[in-house]
């Protein structure tokens, strides 16, 4: 388990991280979100022992990152922001160096490196010097470094930054696969990624936690959550609005767009759920509206994110 | 079993750094410049051939001055580059202590400079051919020169931890090294002894790289000189570590 206890960091008078606490169990993937300069990287740097906190600490699988730093660091795999790697080394030499630092030797080291090269799709560039690699490949090399020793705890600062859509997909799959036996913290700006990968999301703004819940719960906060978006052909918008707002399950009806005898509308229920949807469907067939499309909105994360982080 | 682990860590970092030196073209440029400068000073400025002496004093006396410019150039990348590229974030979050990292890097740089120094052996061959130099004294002078190089390097390693700019590191290191040389430079000592008490003059001159180098160069490897260089190195690397512990980003 990774326990983050009241971590704070100030740079001079500026508070970058302000009393952050949470815990991540094995099997969990915690998404760390927040606007630029919210303090995500700073928090991760404190958890991994790179910068000392102004107060508070992090406990990695029972080892305090401040008091028992070496043991804590042994259990962590870390991918820093911008994926720093030594440009003058070949991919293989670099991973070999990391494997030595992680205490592997002999055949075990070779196997480790081969396995990691394979996993991270680096076979084709094994003997290439890192500074001649493209940005995405550099990112992969640094990611490879973080999982090389099969750590129990993974801290990944924007792991898919700079990867192409296929690689993003592969990396997400890999993270999900690994998560059974690991506790993983990853930061990202891609909300869909958080939704696809994470079991939990912690959102921070201005150094403070403003939300700590599952992606589904977050979506549930959306204005749009449970609303019905539909398009109707050959009907009058005014009578449609008055017909449907008449239902006691419906809060408001909005016409979003009209064109060529079709209009798009959005119906917001009083309480989201199947009952509201059923009553709307019933009303539509009662009044013989020709419905071209019908869709129950899940809610939009970007909207939730914006409202939470700018409040 | 922390000692074995420490050793393994230092070795890993040492090897990486050493390959880093020998893998870059700059290293070979450095070696060539080093040899050319020493050759130039020895043969043209000291008029080695006209001295008519088959000893290497004319050669070794230039070492401190050449080191002063070239060694900060070797050392400047040690930490400044690590900061600039952000790789310091990885090295300090690996299960490696700051001291292991500093020692590994320092030793690699020292071996690199040692290699450059070893490549001056044609000088010894030339002199042996021309006359009959004291080979024991020559060996002593080489050891002294190598130790002094280590002291210069430790200063450079320390200054490179201060900044992410290699140029700044280079200049600060040269200034500090200059002080360490001038404190034992005979004209400075003479000037100083004009007004300062003897004990002060002794302290100043004894803190100089030059004083201890001159004493080893005479052909006696005094333990005190050895101790002096090793303590300078230890002290500078200690400061290096304190700087890194306190200024990480
Ligand atoms: N070494 C430092 N010295 C001074 N201020 C710093 C330092 N490192 C970070 N900060 C400040 O701390 C705040 C948080 O930065 P941090 O890098 O943690 O943000 P972030 O959430 O990772 O943002 P991004 O999404 O842009 O990566 C910022 O205002 C930043 O300027
Ligand atoms: Mg960041």
Image (spheres, grey):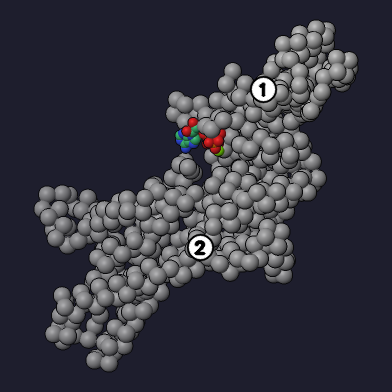
**Chain of the residue on which disc 1 is drawn:** A
A309 to A52, vertically: above or below: above
Q: Are marks 2 and 1 on the same chain?
A: yes
Q: Contact, CB < 8 Å: mark 2 with mark 1?
A: no
**Residue B249 location, x and y as percent?**
47, 42
The mark found on residue B228 in the picture is none
CB of mark 1 near ligand 1 (< 8 Å)? no
**Residue at (34, 52) in percent of width and height:** B169
Q: Nearer the viewer, residue B128 or B186?
A: B128
Determine the image quadrant of residue A50: top right
> Dot 2 falls on which chain?
A
Q: Secondary structure at mark 1?
A: strand
Disc 2: residue Cβ within 8 A of ligand 2's nearest atom:
no
Which numbered circle lies on residue A132?
2
Q: Residue furthest left?
A: B194
Could you tell me residue A70's position as x and y percent?
A: 63, 48
- The residue pinned by badge 1 equals A258
**Does residue B241 appear in this view?**
no
Rate crowding at label 1 as few (under 14), some (14 to 19) or many (20 or more) other CA atoms within 10 Å: some
The location of residue A194, given as percent across then percent down, is: 69, 37
> Is residue A36 visible to the viewer in this orientation of the structure?
yes
Position above or below: A200 against A133: above
Q: Residue at x 76, y 13 (%)?
A: A240
Residue B56 is left or right of residue B47, and the answer is right
Secondary structure, mark 2, is helix
Q: x, y percentage for residue B36?
A: 26, 76
Q: Can you say whether A48 is above or below B209 in the image? A: above
Q: Residues within 10 Å of mark 2 (few under 14, many from 20)?
A: few
Q: Choose the circle earlier in sequence order: 2 or 1.
A: 2
Residue B5's image quarter? bottom right
Residue pictured at 78% horizontal, 41% vertical: A26
Residue B157 vs residue B100: left or right?
Answer: left
């Amino acid at each position: 388990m990774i326990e983050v206890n009241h971590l704070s960091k100030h740079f001079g008078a500026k508070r970058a991280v302000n009393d952050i606490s949470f815990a991540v169990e094995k099997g969990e993937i915690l998404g760390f979100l927040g606007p630029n300069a919210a303090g995500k990287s700073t928090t991760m740097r404190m958890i991994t022992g790179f910068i000392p906190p102004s107060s508070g600490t992090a406990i990695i699988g029972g080892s305090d990152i401040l008091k028992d730093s070496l043991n804590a660091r042994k259990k962590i795999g870390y991918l820093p922001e911008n994926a720093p790697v030594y440009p003058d080394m070949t991919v293989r030499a670099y991973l070999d160096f990391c494997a030595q630092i992680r205490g592997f030797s002999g055949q075990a080291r070779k196997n480790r490196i081969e396995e990691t090269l394979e996993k991270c799709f680096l076979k084709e560039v094994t003997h290439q010097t890192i500074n001649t690699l493209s940005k995405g490949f550099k990112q992969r090399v640094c990611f490879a470094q973080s999982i090389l020793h099969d750590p129990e705890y993974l801290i990944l600062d924007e792991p898919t930054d700079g990867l192409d859509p296929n690689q993003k997909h592969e990396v997400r799959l890999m993270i999900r696969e690994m998560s059974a036996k690991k506790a993983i913290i990853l930061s990202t700006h891609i909300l869909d990624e958080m939704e696809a990968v994470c079991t939990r999301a912690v959102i921070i703004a201005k150094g403070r936690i403003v939300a700590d819940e599952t992606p589904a719960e977050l979506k549930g906060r959306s204005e749009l959550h449970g609303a019905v978006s539909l398009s109707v052909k050959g009907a009058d918008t005014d009578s449609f609005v008055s017909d449907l707002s008449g239902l006691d399950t419906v809060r408001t009806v909005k016409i979003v767009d009209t064109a060529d005898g079709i209009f798009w509308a959005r119906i917001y229920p009083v309480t989201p759920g199947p009952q509201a949807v059923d009553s709307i469907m019933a009303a539509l067939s009662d009044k013989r509206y020709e419905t071209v499309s019908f869709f129950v909105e899940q809610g939009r994360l970007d909207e939730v994110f914006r409202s939470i982080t700018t409040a | 079993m922390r000692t074995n682990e420490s050793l393994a860590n230092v070795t890993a970092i040492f090897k990486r750094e050493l390959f880093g030196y020998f893998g870059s073209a700059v290293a070979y440029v450095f070696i060539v410049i080093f040899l050319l400068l020493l050759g130039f000073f020895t043969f043209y400025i000291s008029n080695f051939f006209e001295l008519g002496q088959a000893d290497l004093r004319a050669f070794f006396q230039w070492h401190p001055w050449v080191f002063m410019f070239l060694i900060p150039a070797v050392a400047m990348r040690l930490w400044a580059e690590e900061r600039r590229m952000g790789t310091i974030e990885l090295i300090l979050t690996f299960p490696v202590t700051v001291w292991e990292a500093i020692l590994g890097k320092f030793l690699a740089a020292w071996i690199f400079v040692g290699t450059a120094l070893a490549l001056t052996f044609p000088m010894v061959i030339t002199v042996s051919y021309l006359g009959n130099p004291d080979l024991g004294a020559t060996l002593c002078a080489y050891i002294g020169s190598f130790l002094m190089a280590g002291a210069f390097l430790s200063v450079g390693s320390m200054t490179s931890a201060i900044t992410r700019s290699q140029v700044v590191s280079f200049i600060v290191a040269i200034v500090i090294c200059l002080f360490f040389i001038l404190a034992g430079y005979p004209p400075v000592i003479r000037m100083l002894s004009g007004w300062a008490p003897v004990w002060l003059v002794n302290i100043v001159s004894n803190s100089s790289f030059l004083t201890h180098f001159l004493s080893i160069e005479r052909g006696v490897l005094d333990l005190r000189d050895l101790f002096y260089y090793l303590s300078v190195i230890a002290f500078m690397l200690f400061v290096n570590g304190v700087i890194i512990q306190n200024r990480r980003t």
